[in-house]
Image (tube, rainbow, N blue to C red):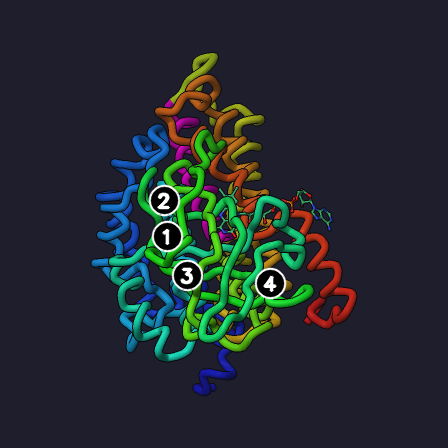
Amino acid sequence: MSNAASDPETASGHGLDLFHPSDEHALLDRSLRDFVAGEVEPQAAEHDRAETFNHGLFRKLGDLGFLGVTVPERFGGAGLDAVAAVQLMEVLSTSDPGFGLAVLAHSILFAQNLAVNGNDEQRARILPRASSGEWIGGMCMTEPGAGTDVLGMRMTATRSGDAYRLTGTKTFITNGGIDDHTLGDVFIVYAATGEREISSFLVEKGMAGFSLGQKWTDKLGMRASFTAELVFEDVAVPVANRLGEEGEGTLHMMRNLEIERLTLAAQAVGIAERCLRVMVDYATERKTFGVPIRNHGQIQRHIAETFAEYRAARTYVYDTARRLSLTATGQRLDADGTKLFASQAAKRAADAAMQVLGGNGYMGEYVVSRLWRDAKLLEIGGGTLEAHHKNITKDLSRDASILGG
Ligand SMILES: Cc1cc2nc3c(=O)[nH]c(=O)nc-3n(C[C@H](O)[C@H](O)[C@H](O)COP(=O)(O)OP(=O)(O)OC[C@H]3O[C@@H](n4cnc5c(N)ncnc54)[C@H](O)[C@@H]3O)c2cc1C
């Protein structure tokens, strides 16, 4: 039989490369890995130690076209899909998840969000600058009194003629600043326009009343990203800076959270990959009782369990990316599922790696202690584990047809 569709090997997907579904994806993977080896890895430990964001490196990523990974080409982006966004976050996180988080906040929480939820005037004015790295963006959802319960936010936007007046405080904002004195350039800000009604706005540096509050220092991990409080004191934001219609903010937020959670899960996969590389090498080199420690069953258990979880997480993440539309909504189940599983797998991977390395694992030189600290954020940011439990249970109770499907 010559019909390809009836060839059992083709039909069972033997030709499918889940992780590089096209030549373009394979090329992207190689370019990213070269960039990470040459530019990201040499600076990672230093910026973690100093708790500083490497703005110069960020601009280099912009020059290479990575910052607008999913932004349509007509707005200066690379016009790629969710698989490419996952590759970007995975590969950066094999080396520097903190820097990766800053890239994620910019390219996914801001640029991808604007590309989908903004209008053409907003996109044309801002996205080319965001894609090149000339401007750095972020997303402001969390407040001192409201994180998971986002509809409980206190920040208000009150319409007054051709502008809205925004008042309130946002906190834990990645890219809120570039350094201690410099505010980020542009943000998508969610604010209440009514009782449990949220709208989205573009707030730009230079708007009167908009300022950088405290920088969060001494974070457990992700120290190469800048996390800040942002203060809004009666900031006049033109109606032209509202995204979509009044009250559509919850929809924008939920739509963006899907790709946010998937790319955070990709960060977890990158962390697990690096942990495996480190522990396999170390277990071969390090000898105790006259043999490499990889000969000991308990060490083999750490390596093998981590490998299986890494493969499971990576496959789940890429399979979800392959099916995820960048413009649709209603894809929450697997976005939450990937982050729920991969974030915990990454934390276990970093813990196993530290155990395999013994005292050396506890020392900064061997990287895994930094990855261990970074991994924890993935169980909190962009939705806590408990939020994923709640969402997954709710979605499955409504429709369980995915099971066995
Ligand atoms: C380094 C870092 C970077 C961040 N970057 C950004 C950013 O760029 N933009 C942004 O907007 N936010 C950002 N965040 C905020 C992050 O998304 C929130 O911290 C997260 O959503 C949790 O909110 P919370 O901290 O207010 O915790 P809370 O919502 O107060 O939760 C506290 C605990 O209660 C649990 N809980 C809450 N509700 C329930 C429930 N119904 N059932 C069971 N348990 C529940 C939670 O799971 C958690 O364990 C960042 C946070 C960090 C640490």
Q: Amino acid at mark 4?
A: Ala
Q: Amino acid at mark 1?
A: Val
Magenta segment's dominant SS is helix
Residue 351 position, x and y percent, is: 54, 31
Residue behind mark 1 = 103
Q: Is residue 58 visible?
A: yes
Going from N to C along the chain, the mark reached first, 1 or 4, is: 1
Going from N to C along the chain, the mark reached first, 3 or 2, is: 2
Q: Is residue 125 left or right of residue 259?
A: left
Rounded to the nearest angstrom, the CA distance separating label 2 from label 1 is 6 Å
Helix, strand or loop for disc 2: helix
Going from N to C along the chain, the mark reached first, 1 or 3, is: 1
Residue behind mark 2 = 99
Q: Which label sits on residue 203? A: 3
Q: Is there a contact, CB below 8 Å, between mark 2 and mark 4? A: no
> Which residues make up the magenta segment?
264-285
Rounded to the nearest angstrom, the CA distance separating label 3 from label 4 is 15 Å
Q: Is there a contact, CB below 8 Å, between mark 1 and mark 4? A: no
Residue 31 position, x and y percent, is: 26, 56
Instruction: Determine crowd level at label 2: few under 14, some 14-19, many 20+ residues with C-alpha closer than 10 A.
Output: many
Residue behind mark 4 = 192
Task: Mark 1 vs mark 4: give the one in front.
Answer: 4
